[in-house]
Amino acid sequence: MEIAAETVDTICAVSTPPGEGGISIIRISGPDSRTILEKIFRPKKKTTKLPGGTLRLGYIFDPGNGADIDEVLAVFMKAPGTYTREDVAEVHSHGGFAAQSSIIKAILSQGARLADPGEFTKRAFLNGRIDLVQAESVLDVIKSETDEELKYAVNYLKGRLSKKVNTFRDVLKNALAAFEASIDFPDEDIDIDFSGHLALLKKARKDIDDLVSSYYEGKGLKSGFEVLIAGRTNVGKSSILNALALKERAIVTDLPGTTRDLIEETLYIKGMKVHLIDSAGIRTPENIVEEEGVRRVKEKASEADLIVWVLDGSQPFSAEDQHVYDVISQYKSIVIINKSDLTRHIDLNILTSLKITSYIEMSAKTGLGLDEAKSLIFSNLLKAGRKNSLLITTIRHRDILKKVSHNIGTVINGLENDEYHAELLAFELHEALHHLGEITGETCSEDILNTIFSQFCIGK
């Protein structure tokens, strides 16, 4: 990809979080990095020129009046062995708004400009140090909240998905070369065996479809799964939320209809991020507030990754319970039979008649069955037996791979059904290669690049 003209200037930004802290790192990148640093940095041990890659102790000073701003460590790193593949300088100052602001002002006074969000990583991409998948993974590493999330982000950063995409690209390029040979030399006696290409295309499409199907798990890993707690009034939904979250998040009373709105709490189950949502009891509303609460429950049910249907084990299955089932039966759900510390009056045969096999008895009051409930939620959110260690975690990658699968599918159908129109099948392969380039960045538009890098913080 051709480097944009504006990347020849020198940029700077604070790369550590704003506020008070033991240290603050200010990064400068571009052709004037060394010159700017030498104009505002006074090393304690005098030297004619800052050596590359060596931290030096000294003072950043105001070039206008010569006053010292802060005692710092400063380093210059020469291109191309840097994050951006440009000349880079860093100032490691004390943390604090005043020091950061004054040092940035000194740098700007020497001709640098403030970096845009994600511009350092964008330059690393434009200069060929990383591809677009790796650039996106930098943000994922920064935002990772669990060990599993971090593991996948680092795998992307190391290029695992990029390597997989490149294997698909090799298969498509080889098949395309065969088609183009038959197009360019139609009258020549060239014996091209497409059976080998067909087998490789089928395998590539299966691998691509597997990646597409992994998005559900990847999305949950990255953003967290939404789990809606539903049931009729006064079955203990809020108590279940509090027990799972290990805190008094929702108000619990004996009065039916206490919860009127959706209450959300995030917790981690075996390293998996789960957004638990407590909801209003589903029943015939008695006022407009309850009516709105029930409407929101029904709306959220269609969006949730899993519904936890709570039944009161100390009471018989009721018409209101049946009404709840009618509302949620079309969605993926499990059943928690609450109040197992009391005498059971619910007939479990009801669940059998409803073809419900995923249920557990627990007591939100005593904690009995709590660990089993968490395990049941976990196992129902993750697809059982998934062995694919590579997951798609962004909708951008998923949608692009769907297009590639469609292109390859058209080629496969053409070969299998003897609908051999080499020009049309070659066009489909060209389209598939173009889409794969959108993932790694070779064929990505400037608008998409700007959208991706605008999600980064300034300084990264």
Image (cartoon, rainbow, N blue to C red):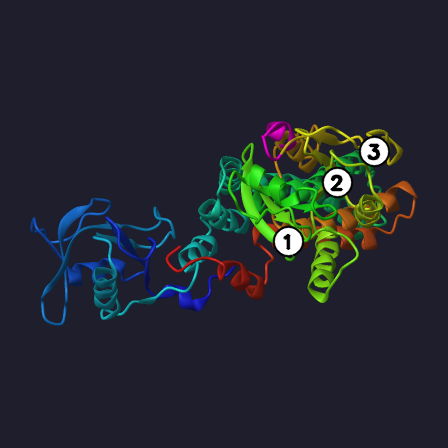
Q: Secondary structure at mark 3?
A: helix
The picture places residue 329, in percent across and down from the top left corner, at 82, 44
The numbered disc on residue 351 is: 3
Residue 372 is one of the magenta-drawn residues: yes
The picture places residue 138, in percent across and down from the top left corner, at 47, 48
Q: Of residues 205 and 242, which is closer to you in this image?
A: 242
- Looking at the picture, which amino acid does disc 1 mark? Thr
Q: Quadrant of the C terminus?
A: bottom left
Q: Is residue 226 visible?
A: no
Q: Secondary structure at mark 1?
A: loop
- Magenta segment main secondary structure: loop
- According to the image, label 1 marks what residue? 259
Residue 214 is one of the magenta-drawn residues: no
- Looking at the picture, which amino acid does disc 2 mark? Ser
What residue do we see at 79% from left, 32% from top? 346
Mark 3 surroundings: few (<14), some (14-19) or many (≥20) residues within 10 A: some
The numbered disc on residue 82 is: none
What residue do we see at 50% from left, 59% from top? 455
The numbered disc on residue 333 is: 2
Asked if residue 123 is positioned above or below residue 380 in the image, the reply reads below
- Give the CA separation, mark 3 to mark 1: 26 Å
- Looking at the picture, which amino acid does disc 3 mark? Leu
| Lower sequence index among marks 2 and 1 | 1
Q: Which residues are magenta?
A: 364-373
Mark 1 surroundings: few (<14), some (14-19) or many (≥20) residues within 10 A: many
Q: Secondary structure at mark 2?
A: strand
- Give the CA separation, mark 3 to mark 2: 12 Å
What residue do we see at 81% from left, 47% from top? 320
